[in-house]
Amino acid sequence: MATMFCAVIVLGLLAAAPAGADTTPVVDGRFDLGEGYTMGAAVRFEVEAGKPKKGEAPPPAGSNEVGGGLLAWYQDSATGALSVAFVLPRSLVDNSYGVNAIGWGKDVAPSGKNHNFQDLLGSDDVQFVFRDTSGNTLLDFTIDYLYVPDGGDPAFAADEIGGDGSVDVGNASDILAAGSSLAYNYGLYGASNPELFGDGTYSPAADADYIVTDPALAGWVFDVTYEFTIAGSVFAGNDFDPTGAAAINVPLLHASPNKIDRNKVFPTIEDPTPIENPEPSTIAALISMGLMGLAIAWRRRKRASS
């Protein structure tokens, strides 16, 4: 029931978000509903269950399911380029770690796992598959959440298919730009606050609602977000429908560790819906469901435009 309600809330947000006409999303790893995304879908996640202990029954189907994810996209009518954002719920994984981890640990998280910076750097990734209306795969790739580019450059990045990323169908050059929210955080605070990044470091101190204690670090993004743009040439001459339910698929997410159970996570994308205009009740509902990051993004944009 909680998962279904969460999906309804996310869909409500999509129906209540500012229209993104004539605006191309900025692919920097920081998701903002007002930056130009025109389609979206709620996402729920089934987390791989661990082997039951001796004498214990395996968990029932659906017991490791969590909702609250969001997939948003926009296709440029002139170039055909497709921009995509994938936002994970904080109940699954977040950008909090070290001594300031929120909702992690033996007595808090169902998985009992702690969370460290190296966990996010070392293995987290997600697979995306794009298909035409006949079911033919146009592009199939896996993008790493965060990695150190070749050459020893300390600027952690996700601006290309590197690290644990790979391309199974198509070419790496088909991905024109890519970013993640932790790479965004590094770009914002890596030079001024090196204590936030690297082995043994910790995220900014924040309360249980992810409100950061230090105003100088208030821009920290806790939502784990993948964002990228695909070249229009991938879709040119193919019957690709960006409004179709089967156009974008996310077969597998690797979140190691996550708050629920084991490392493999299987997303289910709900039916897409156009992104339109907001109502305050939607924002209040989002906050009550713990999706405050998305609500704050909308409120910042509204304040800036008023």
Image: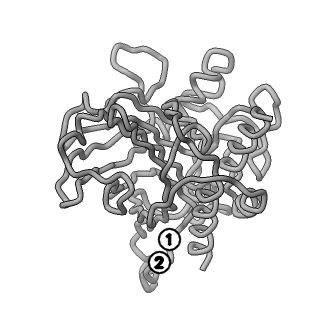
259 relative position to 306: left or right: left
Query: What is the quadrant of the N terminus in the image?
Result: bottom right
Q: Amino acid at mark 2?
A: Gly
Residue 231: quadrant of the picture? top left
Marking on residue 1: none
145 relative position to 296: left or right: left
Residue beneath the point at 28% across and 50% down: 130
Q: Position of residue 19 (x, y in %)?
A: 59, 46
Residue beneath the point at 51% across and 56% down: 274
Q: Nearer the viewer, residue 108 or 228?
A: 228
> In the displayed structure, would residue 3 be above or below residue 115?
below
118 relative position to 206: left or right: left
Say few, some or many: other residues with alpha carbon within 10 Å of mark 1 (under 14 / 14 to 19 / 20 or more): some
Coloration of the structure image: one colour
Q: Secondary structure at mark 1?
A: strand
Marking on residue 62: 2
Residue beneath the point at 40% across and 37% down: 76
Q: Position of residue 86 (x, y in %)?
A: 48, 48
Q: Nearer the viewer, residue 208 or 32?
A: 32
Q: Amino acid at mark 1?
A: Glu
Q: CA distance from mark 2 to mark 1?
A: 5 Å
Marking on residue 65: 1
Q: Are marks 2 and 1 in contact (CB under 8 Å)?
A: yes
Query: What is the quadrant of the C terminus in the image?
Result: top right
Q: Secondary structure at mark 2?
A: loop
